[in-house]
């Protein structure tokens, strides 16, 4: 019961914060879906060390619907192009990093959905396409820096023995995503 309450409070809180952050239009549909699944994704990743496709993949459909709706509403396609371009770029970039180890494919898929959602929300606000890509790129870099800090903190707490466990990266992805969406 407590876990369900926490999930509801987080989803409602993030949704209200998103809508209150200003200028949330149809492109925010993907982000609203992510608000609903953020708490379950974090809980699942911490507990199981993986991100379930059943929660991650529908986010891509919500991002596409929001980006296309926003593009149709404005009569141009910059929102949809930005969401698709940044989502695909994140998918490819994170997949290359995952091939080296340390990231799972759930992290890769979540990163693609988050990049697409962030690009859609930012592009709907009207900056030039290059600025949208810069914002999403900064999010990706900051996410890896935050992940390094978290890993360093965990390793620092285990000085007497080697780090033998994997660390969930989903909470870091989601935390930096929400920071960029709500603050920026």
Image (tube, rainbow, N blue to C red):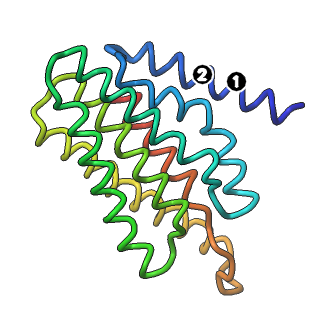
Q: Residues within 10 Å of mark 2 (few under 14, many from 20)?
A: few
Q: Nearer the viewer, residue 173 or 61?
A: 61
Residue at the outermost right position:
1
- The residue where tag 1 is placed is 9
- Which residue is located at x 70 percent, y 24 percent? 9
Q: Residue 147 appears at what percent x and percent y?
A: 48, 61
Q: Residues within 10 Å of mark 1 (few under 14, many from 20)?
A: some
Check the image and report above or below for 156 versus 59.
below
Quarter the C terminus occupies: top left
Judged left or right of residue 15, residue 4 is right
Circle 1: element type = helix
Given contact means CB atoms under 8 Å apart, are the residues at marks 1 and 2 in contact? yes
Q: Residue 95 appears at what percent x and percent y?
A: 39, 69
- Which residue is located at x 47 percent, y 56 percent? 109
Judged left or right of residue 16, residue 100 is left
Judged left or right of residue 17, residue 12 is right
Cα distance, mark 1 to mark 2?
6 Å
Check the image and report above or below for 152 versus 125.
below
- The residue where tag 2 is placed is 13
Check the image and report above or below for 3 versus 170.
above
- Label at residue 175: none
Check the image and report above or below for 70 versus 176.
above
Circle 2: element type = helix
- Which residue is located at x 46 percent, y 32 percent? 62
Q: Residue 72 appears at what percent x and percent y?
A: 24, 19
- Which residue is located at x 90 percent, y 31 percent? 1
């Amino acid at each position: 019961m407590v876990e369900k309450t926490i999930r509801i409070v987080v989803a409602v809180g993030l949704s209200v914060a998103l809508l209150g952050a200003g200028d949330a239009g149809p492109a925010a549909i993907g982000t609203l879906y992510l608000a609903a699944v953020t708490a379950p994704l974090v809980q699942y990743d911490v507990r199981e060390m993986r991100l379930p496709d059943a929660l991650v993949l529908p986010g891509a459909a919500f991002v596409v619907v929001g980006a296309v709706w926003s593009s149709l509403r404005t009569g141009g396609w910059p929102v949809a192009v930005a969401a698709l371009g940044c989502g695909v770029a994140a998918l490819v970039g994170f997949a290359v990093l995952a091939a080296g180890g340390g990231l799972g494919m759930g992290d890769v898929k979540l990163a693609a959905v988050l990049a697409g959602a962030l690009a859609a929300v930012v592009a709907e606000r009207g900056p030039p396409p290059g600025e949208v890509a810069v914002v999403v790129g900064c999010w990706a870099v900051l996410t890896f820096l935050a992940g390094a800090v978290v890993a360093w903190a965990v390793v620092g707490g285990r000085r007497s023995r080697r780090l033998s466990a994997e660390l969930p990266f989903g909470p870091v992805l989601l935390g930096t995503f929400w920071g960029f969406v709500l603050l920026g």
